């Protein structure tokens, strides 16, 4: 039994993380805060000492808490429709406007996969020799160090995201290295999205800020979006993640379909057409689950009579809880799902990822092992039912990538 903690420790830990990152309280994993605090106490520090240090956002302890709360999940060409739109619509429009160079910013780039994907997409979409550059920024300095190394394992390459543009070379041990032409035009810097990007970084034609603001409180999200808009060139595009804006940001217009969540900064003298009806109701945005629920489709009347099979229903319930920020509730539902239906691969993966995101790798590993064992028994191309029908090899590859990654650390 672990000793009782002074409750003020976790409350203050969450406050300090929230004030530095902009995270909603319910997007901060309690387990992660507790791990850091217990680690400090185990080194002989007193509660009063920790409470005092947490009053200072610049302190070592505050930094450790922030790092523990950040979620760095990312992979190459995630949300491929954004890269396609950039290449097929965004770049030609910028060239028609007479841009003499194109600049992209991956804001909240984690370990750099998004920044390099953006650089590769730009590089492949401009005439030969046309100047292109990309900046990747993040709060997490260790992630940026990984990004600068430009060497990635299988976890960064997902079957669900196609390799749209030339990006890397195969190396040894299934590692890949970013192509020199892509690496040369990409740089990284530490920056907090709640503060303006320093002037020296200039302005951008394309900003990707995806799967970051989903963790933010409404006010922090709005402040961050306003700062991102300020860093765009007129006519520049802002690409946000699926549920990260509930209205068109000021001074911008929507581009493409609503699902694209892409906005263009109006040029001087240009006025917005009537603001489209907000697509997302005002509510706190959730941490993104790996497997998204399918877009809402009208439920056929028949479906109300014949409920879906229990595993999928429980899985959807867990996803809804994750989306609503109820991580503990989602965890309980997924645990019961895995007990009831141990062969339901999406449930095993979802629970493993939930554990990983909460910093409980020791609990994620056996789940990934069970996932691999069960996925191996199926023909690789067999489609596995779940919120998305994915082939068995997707689950096997996900487990392999995760377990190999653990072995490398
Ligand atoms: C889930 S990752 C998303 C990576 C990438 N954009 C993608 O979509 O694949 C979120 C990243 O946002 C960063 N982040 C969170 N809050 C931030 C903040 N206030 N300022 C800068 N980066 C932040 C985290 O460190 C993490 O690396």
Image: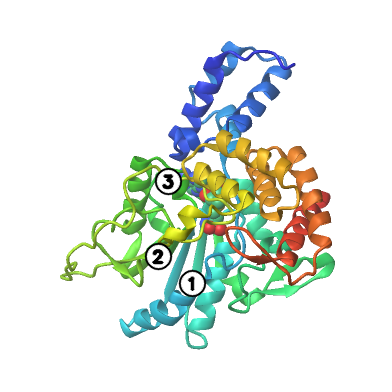
The answer to whether residue 72 shows anywhere in this view is yes
Answer yes or no: do the residues labelled 1 and 2 have beta carbons within 8 Å? yes
Position above or below: 173 against 61: below
Badge 1, how many Cα within 10 Å: few under 14, some, many 20+? few
Residue 52 vs residue 353, the one in the foreground? 353
For the point 33% across and 41% down, the residue is 219
**In-image side of 339 versus 184 (left or right):** right
Q: Closer to the N terminus: mark 1 or mark 3?
A: 1
Badge 3, how many Cα within 10 Å: few under 14, some, many 20+? many
Count the numbered circles shown: 3
Answer yes or no: do the residues labelled 1 and 3 have beta carbons within 8 Å? no
Mark on residue 7?
A: none
**In-image side of 2 versus 245 (left or right):** right
For the point 40% across and 65% down, the residue is 259
The residue that disc 3 covers is: 285
The answer to whether residue 299 shows anywhere in this view is no
- In which quadrant of the rendered image does the N terminus lie? top right
The residue that disc 1 covers is: 81
Residue 172, image x, y percentages = 83, 68
Q: Classify residue 258 by image quadrant.
A: bottom left
The residue that disc 2 covers is: 259
Q: Classify residue 256 by image quadrant.
A: bottom left
* Spatial separation of the CA atoms under disc 1 and disc 2: 10 Å
Element under label 3? loop
Residue 317, image x, y percentages = 54, 45
Position above or below: 149 against 217: below
Residue 355, image x, y percentages = 67, 41
């Amino acid at each position: 039994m672990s000793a009782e903690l002074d409750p003020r420790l976790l409350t203050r830990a969450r406050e300090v993380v929230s004030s530095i990152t902009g995270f909603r309280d319910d997007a901060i994993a309690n387990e992660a805060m507790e791990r850091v605090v217990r680690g400090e106490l185990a080194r002989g520090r007193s509660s009063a000492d920790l409470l005092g240090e947490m009053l200072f956002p610049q302190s070592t302890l505050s930094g450790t808490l922030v790092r523990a709360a950040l979620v760095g999940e990312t992979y190459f060409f995630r949300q491929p429709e954004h890269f396609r739109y950039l290449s097929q619509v965004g770049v030609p429009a910028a060239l028609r406007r007479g841009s003499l160079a194109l600049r992209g910013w991956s804001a909240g780039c984690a370990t750099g996969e998004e920044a390099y994907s953006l650089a590769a997409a730009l590089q492949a979409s401009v005439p030969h020799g046309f100047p292109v550059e990309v900046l990747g920024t993040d709060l997490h300095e260790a992630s940026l160090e990984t990004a600068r190394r430009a060497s990635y394992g299988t976890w960064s390459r997902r079957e669900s995201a196609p390799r749209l543009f030339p990006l890397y070379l195969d190396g040894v041990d299934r590692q890949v290295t970013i192509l020199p032409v892509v690496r040369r035009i990409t740089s990284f810097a530490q920056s907090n999205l709640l503060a303006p990007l320093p002037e020296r970084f200039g302005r951008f034609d394309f900003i990707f800020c995806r799967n970051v603001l989903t963790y933010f409180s409404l006010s922090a999200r709005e402040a961050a979006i306003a700062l991102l808009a300020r860093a765009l060139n007129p006519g520049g595009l802002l690409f946000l993640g699926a549920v990260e804006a509930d209205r068109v940001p000021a001074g911008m217009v929507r581009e493409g379909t609503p699902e694209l969540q892409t906005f263009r900064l109006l040029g001087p003298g240009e006025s917005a057409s009537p603001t489209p009806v907000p697509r997302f109701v005002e509510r706190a945005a959730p941490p993104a689950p790996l497997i998204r629920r399918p877009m809402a489709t009208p439920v056929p009347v028949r479906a109300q009579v014949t409920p879906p099979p229990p595993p999928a229903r429980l899985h959807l319930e867990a996803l809804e809880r994750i989306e609503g920020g109820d991580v503990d509730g989602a965890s309980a539902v997924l645990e019961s799902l895995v007990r009831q239906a141990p062969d339901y691969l999406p449930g095993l993966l979802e629970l493993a990822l939930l554990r990983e995101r909460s910093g409980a790798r020791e609990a994620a590993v056996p789940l990934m092992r069970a996932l691999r064992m069960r996925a191996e028994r199926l023909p690789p191309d067999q489609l596995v039912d779940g919120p998305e029908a994915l082939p068995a090899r997707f689950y096997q590859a996900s487990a392999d990538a995760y377990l190999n990654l653990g072995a490398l650390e």
